[in-house]
Image (cartoon, rainbow, N blue to C red):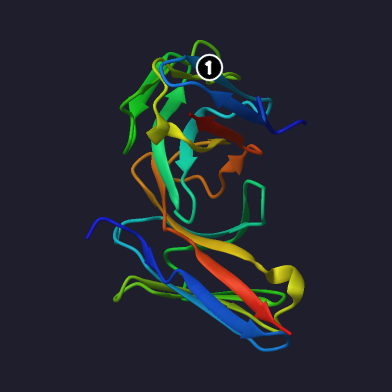
Amino acid sequence: NAGVTQTPKFRILKIGQSMTLQCAQDMNHNYMYWYRQDPGMGLKLIYYSVGAGITDKGEVPNGYNVSRSTTEDFPLRLELAAPSQTSVYFCASSVSGRDSYEQYFGPGTRLTVT
Amino acid sequence: GEDVEQSLFLSVREGDSSVINCTYTDSSSTYLYWYKQEPGAGLQLLTYIFSNMDMKQDQRLTVLLNKKDKHLSLRIADTQTGDSAIYFCAENRDDKIIFGKGTRLHILP
């Protein structure tokens, strides 16, 4: 199993540009999550999904959109990039939510908006 | 409060024990976790404890849980340079896992 994969690893965007961060998992996990990690800070949940076709907002959803058309993929879309979105983005997946004992994390995407 | 709280920094001499503390918020959390993040990498699960346990030991790691005070600690015995990382405390809440800000463990020679 490849686990959780993310692309790209690094990206620099200009203000106002848009992009999609890709996330895929091959463990047949129902739950998938997007977090952002700002320097010296913990993780903030952006969006999550409990299964294909179902998404929900986390703590910091503004400026982002997600979709979950398949179990495997959970892309994160930035429509109008802003400097405040400069961060490291982590995708994660788990078998279930409340009773899951582990989230598996991808390697992260480092995004800079200038 | 709503946050999982932990101190931001800890310095320990190589060979000593490290103790990282955390307070969580949801008394109904089923699992409490410790994740480790090495520089430039994602988070990896280090250990976890069921909420009906007081203690869990796994080689050099000891997790203590005080449900009354909602206090969780991670003890690393014989701390090594490879233990230098950020350690995140987390609790499961509804369908989500809520993370603390992380404690950066610095190893002194």
Image spot of residue B36 (x, y percent): 61, 59
Q: Pick whichever, B17 or B33, lies toward us.
A: B17
Chain assignment, label 1: A
Q: Tell me the quadrant of the picture where the N terminus of chain B can be found.
A: bottom left
The residue sitting at 43% across, 27% down in the picture is A50
Q: Is residue B22 above or below residue B29?
A: below
Q: Quadrant of residue A22?
A: top right
On the question of residue A98 being in view, the answer is: no
**Residue B68, how many percent across, how many down?**
29, 75
* Residue at screen point 48% across, 33% down: A33
**Label 1: few (<14), some or many (≥20) within 10 Å?**
some
Tell whether B12 sits left or right of B22: right
A91 to A101, vertically: above or below? above
Tell me where residue A95 sits by quadrant. top right
Write down the residue under mark 1. A20
Name the residue located 48 percent from the left edge and 29 percent from the top edge.
A114
Going by the image, does B3 lie left or right of B78?
left
* Quadrant of the rendered image containing residue B5: bottom left
Q: Residue furthest top?
A: A69
Q: Please say whether residue A109 is visible from this viewpoint.
A: yes
Q: Amino acid under label 1?
A: Thr
x, y percentage for residue B103? 50, 67
Residue furthest left in the image? B1
* Relative height, residue B61 to residue A62 (above, below): below
Q: In this orientation, which residue lies closer to the viewer: B103 or B64? A: B103
The C terminus of chain B lies in quadrant: bottom right
Q: Secondary structure at mark 1?
A: strand
Number of marks drawn:
1
